[in-house]
Protein backbone atom coordinates (compact mmCIF):
# COMPACT_ATOMS: atom_id res chain seq x y z
CA UNK A 1 0.00 0.00 0.00
CA UNK A 2 2.87 2.35 0.80
CA UNK A 3 4.36 1.89 -2.70
CA UNK A 4 0.95 2.53 -4.29
CA UNK A 5 0.62 5.78 -2.31
CA UNK A 6 4.11 6.87 -3.40
CA UNK A 7 3.39 6.20 -7.07
CA UNK A 8 0.05 7.98 -6.82
CA UNK A 9 1.70 11.05 -5.31
CA UNK A 10 4.17 11.37 -8.17
CA UNK A 11 2.89 13.64 -10.88
CA UNK A 12 3.46 12.99 -14.60
CA UNK A 13 6.46 15.33 -14.78
CA UNK A 14 8.22 13.59 -11.92
CA UNK A 15 7.52 10.20 -13.46
CA UNK A 16 8.95 11.30 -16.80
CA UNK A 17 12.01 12.85 -15.16
CA UNK A 18 12.60 9.64 -13.21
CA UNK A 19 12.27 7.53 -16.34
CA UNK A 20 14.61 9.82 -18.27
CA UNK A 21 17.19 9.67 -15.49
CA UNK A 22 17.06 5.87 -15.43
CA UNK A 23 17.32 5.62 -19.23
CA UNK A 24 20.41 7.82 -19.25
CA UNK A 25 22.16 5.08 -17.32
CA UNK A 26 21.55 2.41 -19.98
CA UNK A 27 24.06 2.46 -22.88
CA UNK A 28 22.60 2.01 -26.35
CA UNK A 29 24.60 0.84 -29.44
CA UNK A 30 27.99 2.02 -28.25
CA UNK A 31 30.45 2.46 -31.09
CA UNK A 32 33.46 3.57 -29.07
CA UNK A 33 34.42 3.47 -25.39
CA UNK A 34 32.31 5.82 -23.34
CA UNK A 35 32.11 6.37 -19.63
CA UNK A 36 28.76 6.55 -17.84
CA UNK A 37 28.24 7.74 -14.31
CA UNK A 38 25.16 7.36 -12.19
CA UNK A 39 24.39 7.82 -8.57
CA UNK A 40 20.67 7.08 -8.63
CA UNK A 41 19.07 4.44 -6.43
CA UNK A 42 15.47 3.31 -6.22
CA UNK A 43 14.09 3.81 -2.71
CA UNK A 44 10.78 2.05 -2.05
CA UNK A 45 10.65 2.89 1.65
CA UNK A 46 10.18 6.66 1.56
CA UNK A 47 8.40 9.35 -0.41
CA UNK A 48 11.67 10.12 -2.23
CA UNK A 49 11.62 7.37 -4.86
CA UNK A 50 15.03 8.21 -6.32
CA UNK A 51 18.01 8.74 -4.03
CA UNK A 52 21.39 10.08 -5.08
CA UNK A 53 24.09 8.58 -2.80
CA UNK A 54 27.59 10.01 -2.55
CA UNK A 55 29.31 7.16 -4.46
CA UNK A 56 29.39 6.92 -8.24
CA UNK A 57 30.04 3.99 -10.56
CA UNK A 58 31.97 4.26 -13.83
CA UNK A 59 30.83 1.87 -16.54
CA UNK A 60 32.92 1.49 -19.69
CA UNK A 61 31.64 -0.74 -22.48
CA UNK A 62 33.25 -1.70 -25.78
CA UNK A 63 32.76 -4.65 -28.12
CA UNK A 64 35.38 -7.33 -27.59
CA UNK A 65 38.05 -7.93 -30.22
CA UNK A 66 36.49 -11.35 -30.90
CA UNK A 67 33.05 -9.75 -31.44
CA UNK A 68 34.54 -7.24 -33.86
CA UNK A 69 36.43 -9.94 -35.77
CA UNK A 70 33.39 -12.22 -36.03
CA UNK A 71 31.08 -9.38 -37.08
CA UNK A 72 33.49 -8.31 -39.82
CA UNK A 73 34.00 -11.83 -41.10
CA UNK A 74 30.26 -12.54 -41.10
CA UNK A 75 29.73 -9.69 -43.53
CA UNK A 76 32.67 -10.42 -45.84
CA UNK A 77 31.48 -12.63 -48.73
CA UNK A 78 35.07 -13.14 -49.97
CA UNK A 79 36.21 -14.49 -46.58
CA UNK A 80 33.15 -16.75 -46.49
CA UNK A 81 33.89 -17.98 -50.01
CA UNK A 82 37.50 -18.82 -49.08
CA UNK A 83 36.34 -20.65 -45.97
CA UNK A 84 33.84 -22.69 -47.99
CA UNK A 85 36.47 -23.61 -50.56
CA UNK A 86 38.67 -24.84 -47.72
CA UNK A 87 35.91 -26.86 -46.00
CA UNK A 88 34.22 -28.39 -49.09
CA UNK A 89 36.59 -31.37 -49.57
CA UNK A 90 35.71 -32.68 -46.08
CA UNK A 91 32.09 -33.19 -47.15
CA UNK A 92 32.16 -33.84 -50.89
CA UNK A 93 29.64 -31.06 -51.48
CA UNK A 94 30.24 -28.37 -54.13
CA UNK A 95 31.26 -25.15 -52.36
CA UNK A 96 29.61 -23.13 -55.12
CA UNK A 97 26.23 -24.61 -54.22
CA UNK A 98 26.68 -23.86 -50.52
CA UNK A 99 27.93 -20.36 -51.27
CA UNK A 100 25.04 -19.66 -53.67
CA UNK A 101 22.45 -20.84 -51.15
CA UNK A 102 23.97 -18.56 -48.52
CA UNK A 103 24.23 -15.60 -50.88
CA UNK A 104 20.60 -15.98 -51.94
CA UNK A 105 19.16 -16.65 -48.48
CA UNK A 106 21.10 -13.88 -46.69
CA UNK A 107 21.19 -11.07 -49.23
CA UNK A 108 24.84 -11.71 -50.05
CA UNK A 109 25.70 -12.44 -46.41
CA UNK A 110 24.34 -9.14 -45.17
CA UNK A 111 20.90 -9.86 -43.69
CA UNK A 112 20.22 -9.14 -40.04
CA UNK A 113 19.85 -12.90 -39.44
CA UNK A 114 23.31 -13.45 -40.95
CA UNK A 115 24.86 -10.66 -38.88
CA UNK A 116 23.15 -11.58 -35.59
CA UNK A 117 23.11 -15.38 -35.74
CA UNK A 118 25.59 -16.28 -38.49
CA UNK A 119 22.59 -17.95 -40.11
CA UNK A 120 23.50 -17.45 -43.75
CA UNK A 121 21.26 -20.19 -45.09
CA UNK A 122 17.78 -19.30 -43.85
CA UNK A 123 17.61 -22.38 -41.66
CA UNK A 124 15.03 -22.66 -38.90
CA UNK A 125 15.52 -24.39 -35.56
CA UNK A 126 11.77 -24.86 -35.23
CA UNK A 127 8.65 -23.43 -36.82
CA UNK A 128 9.08 -20.31 -34.65
CA UNK A 129 12.82 -19.79 -34.25
CA UNK A 130 15.88 -19.48 -36.48
CA UNK A 131 19.10 -21.45 -36.17
CA UNK A 132 21.86 -19.59 -34.35
CA UNK A 133 25.58 -20.33 -34.62
CA UNK A 134 28.50 -19.25 -32.45
CA UNK A 135 30.81 -18.51 -35.39
CA UNK A 136 30.65 -18.30 -39.19
CA UNK A 137 32.75 -21.48 -39.29
CA UNK A 138 30.16 -23.37 -37.22
CA UNK A 139 27.39 -22.22 -39.56
CA UNK A 140 29.29 -23.25 -42.68
CA UNK A 141 30.35 -26.66 -41.34
CA UNK A 142 26.76 -27.28 -40.26
CA UNK A 143 25.41 -26.38 -43.70
CA UNK A 144 27.86 -28.67 -45.49
CA UNK A 145 26.98 -31.55 -43.14
CA UNK A 146 23.27 -30.81 -43.48
CA UNK A 147 23.37 -30.80 -47.29
CA UNK A 148 25.49 -33.96 -47.35
CA UNK A 149 23.28 -36.02 -45.05
CA UNK A 150 19.84 -34.67 -45.95
CA UNK A 151 20.30 -34.20 -49.68
CA UNK A 152 23.49 -35.47 -51.32
CA UNK A 153 23.38 -38.89 -49.64
CA UNK A 154 19.84 -39.25 -51.06
CA UNK A 155 20.83 -38.28 -54.60
CA UNK A 156 19.55 -34.70 -54.32
CA UNK A 157 22.69 -32.91 -55.50
CA UNK A 158 21.54 -30.01 -57.68
CA UNK A 159 19.51 -26.90 -56.92
CA UNK A 160 16.63 -28.29 -59.02
CA UNK A 161 16.53 -31.48 -56.92
CA UNK A 162 17.16 -29.77 -53.58
CA UNK A 163 14.77 -26.82 -54.04
CA UNK A 164 11.42 -28.57 -53.59
CA UNK A 165 12.56 -30.03 -50.27
CA UNK A 166 14.74 -27.15 -49.01
CA UNK A 167 12.28 -24.30 -49.38
CA UNK A 168 8.88 -23.14 -50.50
CA UNK A 169 8.44 -21.50 -53.86
CA UNK A 170 9.31 -22.27 -57.45
CA UNK A 171 12.08 -19.74 -58.13
CA UNK A 172 14.63 -20.78 -55.48
CA UNK A 173 16.46 -23.33 -57.68
CA UNK A 174 16.81 -20.99 -60.64
CA UNK A 175 18.09 -18.15 -58.45
CA UNK A 176 20.63 -20.36 -56.67
CA UNK A 177 21.76 -21.77 -60.04
CA UNK A 178 22.14 -18.25 -61.40
CA UNK A 179 24.42 -17.28 -58.48
CA UNK A 180 26.47 -20.47 -58.94
CA UNK A 181 27.13 -19.52 -62.58
CA UNK A 182 28.76 -16.26 -61.46
CA UNK A 183 31.35 -18.08 -59.33
Image: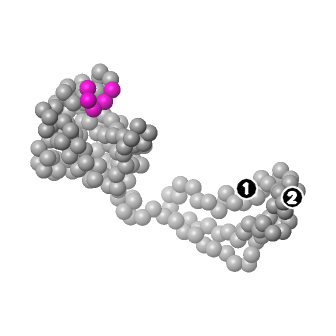
Residue 40 coordinates in the image, percent (x, y): 72, 68
Instruction: Tell me whether circle 2 and circle 1 mark residues in contact (CB < 8 Å).
Output: no
Q: Which secondary structure class fits the magenta region best?
A: helix
Front tag of 2 and 1? 2
Residue 154 position by quadrant: top left
Q: Is residue 72 above or below residue 159?
A: below
Q: Nearer the viewer, residue 78 or 20?
A: 20
Q: Mark 2 — residue?
A: 5
Residue 45 position by quadrant: bottom right
Residue 124 coordinates in the image, percent (x, y): 36, 40
* Residue 56 sits inside the magenta stretch: no
Residue at the (57%, 55%) spot, across then down: 28
The disc placed on residue 49 is none
* Residue 167 sits inside the magenta stretch: yes
Q: Is residue 21 left or right of residue 126?
A: right
Residue 168 coordinates in the image, percent (x, y): 33, 26
Residue span colored magenta = 164-168
Q: Secondary structure at mark 1?
A: helix
Is residue 181 visible to the viewer in this orientation of the structure? no
Q: Residues within 10 Å of mark 2 (few under 14, many from 20)?
A: few
Q: Is residue 141 above or below residue 69?
A: above
Q: Secondary structure at mark 2?
A: helix
**Colouring of the image:** one colour
The disc placed on residue 19 is 1
Amino acid sequence: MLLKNIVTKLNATTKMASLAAILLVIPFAIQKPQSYQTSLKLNTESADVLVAPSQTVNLITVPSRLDQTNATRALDPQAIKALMQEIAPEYGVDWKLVYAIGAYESGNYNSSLARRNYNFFGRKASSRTWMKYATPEDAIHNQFAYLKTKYFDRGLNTPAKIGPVYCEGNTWASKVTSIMRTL
